[in-house]
Image: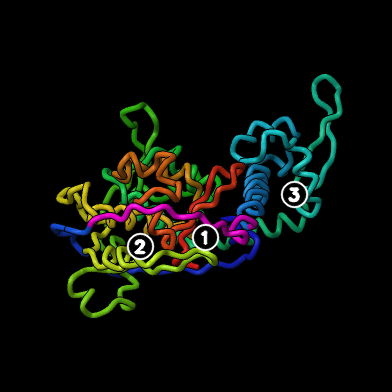
Amino acid sequence: MGYWFLCGKAKVFGFSCGLRKGFSYQQSFSLVNVKLKWVKDKTLDAVVVGERDLRAACNLVSILSSAPNCCLPIYQLSRHRGQLGLPHDLKLSTFIRRYPTIFDESYVFDSAGTRVPCFEMTPEALNLYHDKLGVIREGMMDLLDRLRKLLMLTKDRTLPLQTVDQLKWDLGLPYNYADSLIPHYPDLFCLVRLADDRIGLKLLSWDDTLAVSQLEKNAVMQTEEDLKNNCLAFPIGFTRGFGLKRKCMEWLKEWQKLPYTSPYADASHLDPRTDVSEKRIVGVFHELLHLTIQKKTQRQNVSNLRKPLSLPQKFTKGKIWKLDEKRIFGQKQGLVQENCLCRCGGLIKDRSWS
């Protein structure tokens, strides 16, 4: 919701497509063992650094908006520090003072008579916040569809609330969505107690009109023969300076011709050792990124979704993200892009979107 808050604009997208069913396929293509050099994307790196502050500022605005008089002393704001994603060596008050056009500073006295900094939103920031609420109302159906489709990707249409919390920024959900959004749609969602005693968010019913992937929506860009054989190919765009050897390109071309299994379809019939199954895994990941506002998410978010999305363990292990590996991200850098900024914990971006 961060960029919507700043820009004051959003578009509502409607979806009305059918679901393609997966089918069995005996694949015979072999993997190519190759080492590739990772190419950094400086533009994306700069976006990640800037978004860290944007996200923290937007979360602080949401926290202040729910406080009496939209004003809180620094010691109360510090209780929410874990939700801001700021570096540990950066004082919260120092960060807030960087943005005097958003936050006004005053002082209050605590119980011991000590003067304590207190922060509130500036009138301009308050007006923008109200505009943001209007954007949320206008795009409510889009937000609901994103959340429903995310839950439909999972085995039991259920995710721990903690996992959804970690994705709420990427999905464009309100900061306090669990209280301000979920209770208003009891016919769609409910909170359940999970086996590990955590609280989970469950989608109550399946919607076939939503069970269509982004790749299937873009099927008009595929060839007539590929459509007939359900061999949908992922759009690919390489980072500047990155290239594949002829042998790799030939393998990738053959891999793209493999049958495509919708991430919303039952894939229990697929042999996990095959390239067809691997293409489905990439399809799940591709769809997940397309559910986000900016078509990217932090790597740890993907790790937390491994079990709910039935992804193999190797998919989220550290070695899978290295370019010297031969599977998924190695030869398919054109499909996804990882940003290696340590402070941000890693970031994945769908390059076919940009």
* Magenta-drawn segment: 30-46
Expressed as whole percent of the image width and height from the top left, the position of residue 98 reads 79, 48
Q: Is residue 345 part of the magenta span, yes or no?
A: no
Query: What amino acid is found at the position of numbered circle 1 in the picture?
Result: Gln
As displayed, is residue 50 above or below residue 354? above
- Of badges 1 and 2, nearer the viewer stands 2
Residue 74 sits in which quadrant? top right
As displayed, is residue 113 above or below residue 77? above
| Tag 3 residue | 121
Q: Earlier in the sequence, mark 1 or mark 2?
A: 2
Q: Earlier in the sequence, mark 3 or mark 1?
A: 3
Q: CA distance from mark 2 to mark 3?
A: 54 Å
| Tag 1 residue | 294
- Mark 1 Cα shell of 10 Å, populated few (<14), some (14-19), many (≥20): some
Q: Nearer the viewer, residue 87 or 325?
A: 325
Q: Nearer the viewer, residue 144 or 299?
A: 299
Residue 128 sits in which quadrant? bottom right
In the picture, measured across the screen, residue 346 lies left or right of residue 291, that is right
Element at label 1: loop
| Tag 2 residue | 248
Which residue is found at the position 67% from the left and 44% from the top? 60
Q: Are marks 3 and 1 in contact (CB under 8 Å)?
A: no
Which residue is found at the position 47% from the left and 49% from the top? 181
Asked whether residue 148 is in view, the answer is no
Q: Is residue 35 part of the magenta span, yes or no?
A: yes
Q: Are marks 1 and 2 in contact (CB under 8 Å)?
A: no
Q: Are marks 2 and 3 in contact (CB under 8 Å)?
A: no
Asked whether residue 285 is in view, the answer is yes
Expressed as whole percent of the image width and height from the top left, the position of residue 2 reads 60, 55
Q: CA distance from mark 1 to mark 2?
A: 29 Å
Which residue is found at the position 36% from the left and 51% from the top? 326
Element at label 2: helix
